[in-house]
Image: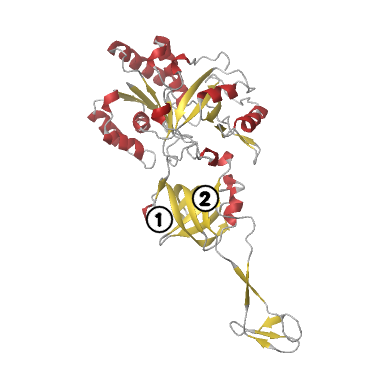
Amino acid sequence: MIIGLDDTDSVNGMCTTYIGTLIVEAIKELDSKLIREPPKLLRLNPNNPYKTRGNGAVSIRITEDATPEVLEKIRSISFDIVSTYSESGDNTNPAIVFLSDNSITEEIKLFAKRALHEMLSIEEAISLLNKIEADYKFIGNGRGLIGALSSCALELDDFTYELIVYRNHLKRGKKFVSETSAMQIEKKYSPKIFSSYDFENERMVISPHSDCPILYGLRGESPEILLEAASTIESEKPFKRNIFITNQGTDMHLQEKSIEEVKPYSSVIIKGIVSKNPYTVAGGHVFFEISNGNKILSAAYEPTKGFRNIIRKLSKGDTVIAYGGVLDTEYGLTVNLEKIEILTLAELYTREKPICPICNNPMKSIGKDKGYRCKKCHTKNKEVSNISIVRDGIQTGLYEVPMCAKRHLSKPLLRYGREKKYEEERFKFDYTKFDIKFEGI
């Protein structure tokens, strides 16, 4: 059986991974061997306007040899936890689904894949669940069913791990996690651990500022390296912890598209030529236009900080590949840049006033396309010299936004070449021996 849950948090607090961890802990107390692999934390469409923060859903796989009696007990415990701990509010619609291992159809797999790229309907999720006679429950309007179902069926290729350490969900206010600890982890463990400390912008990125129960999260390539690094972190006293298999840092949300295929809320990879030079608008956001027959705006928003300096150096005629989510803005459809690859740089020229061949003085223009004349001796010259402009500070290559502006799904450049096959790796870590209760890392 697979348990899927989503939309249990709100802007005021809680976290779906925390509720998933409470469910895992309760199941482990029944029998530690009921769950053989870490739960999955799957990030869905990052452009979804209904998301609370990172649009993450959680799924938990129960071993196939669990008895019907045990499965029924798990269903009851799981729904009780969701009902008890989920946030309430107009934009919070918790849901939990229970699927048998052999009930996931190709239609459901496609639905889960679409949940990364599109806006899906509650009605479609309910229809698919009813078609396979799945057990499900929800609070509110049922929107959480979309993510809950998708988390059970989304197929992974590349994947990463996250170790999340929690404080008690009742505790609110400022969290203490040592910034120095995060710096040391970034220095010592990168690239095996990624996105811990942004040195460029002097910002720790392992600890969220919201009132959710997450104290800190470490993302990397193996549970063992995450546990080792976590043992070095100085923080307030943790409460619980969990290891998740995730699609974070994989670029799973991006799809290659032509400009005419682009739709709002999708995440795309578009190749084109810069057709309008970059310009900066109020707020420090930098826009430019690319074309491959049709045209679309791309933007480096203020939170991308120094990345905007690269964008400002682009020029008409440059060939680029833009990576990012599509927003429907006041300016029209706009790609919110996560990365940009510069394939070719256009040759830029400036006109240089000719020097008088007689008296060696600079000549002056006598009108458009009329040439130049020396002010001193009145010698005329119709030829103009074009001087190539050296384009300092920009070269071909792949550029990414800084760590502090990076989306959960965005693949850091340092992960290129470190991809892993999920089916080959999923049982390498013995999750049956992993303890949720915090007794030191």
The image's mark for residue 437 is: none
Structure colour scheme: secondary structure
Residue 365 lies, in percent from the top left, at 66, 82
The CA span between labels 2 and 1 is: 16 Å
Query: Disc count in the image?
Result: 2
Which secondary structure, mark 1? Answer: helix
Residues at discs 2 and 1 in contact (Cβ within 8 Å): no
Name the residue: 71% across, 80% down: 355
Sequence-wise, the earlier of marks 2 and 1 is: 1
* Circle 1 Cα neighbour tier, 10 Å, few/some/many (<14 / 14–19 / ≥20): some
Residue 166 lies, in percent from the top left, at 54, 21
Image vertical order of residue 74 relative to residue 5, above or below: above
Name the residue: 67% across, 29% down: 180
User: Of the residues tagged 2 and 1, which is closer to the observer?
Assistant: 2
Which secondary structure, mark 2? Answer: strand
- Does residue 269 show up? yes
Image vertical order of residue 376 relative to residue 419, above or below: below
Residue beneath disc 2:
340
- Does residue 283 show up? no
Quadrant of the image containing the C terminus: top right
Residue 260 lies, in percent from the top left, at 37, 56
Residue, far bottom: 378
Q: Left or right: where does residue 292 sit relative to residue 370? A: left
For the residue marked with disc 2, what is the amino acid? Ile
Quadrant of the image containing the N terminus: top left
Viewer-proximal residue among 216 and 106: 106
For the residue marked with disc 1, what is the amino acid? Ile
* Circle 2 Cα neighbour tier, 10 Å, few/some/many (<14 / 14–19 / ≥20): many
Residue beneath disc 1:
259
Viewer-proximal residue among 84 and 111: 111
Residue 206 lies, in percent from the top left, at 58, 30
Question: Quarter of the image holding residue 387?
Answer: bottom right
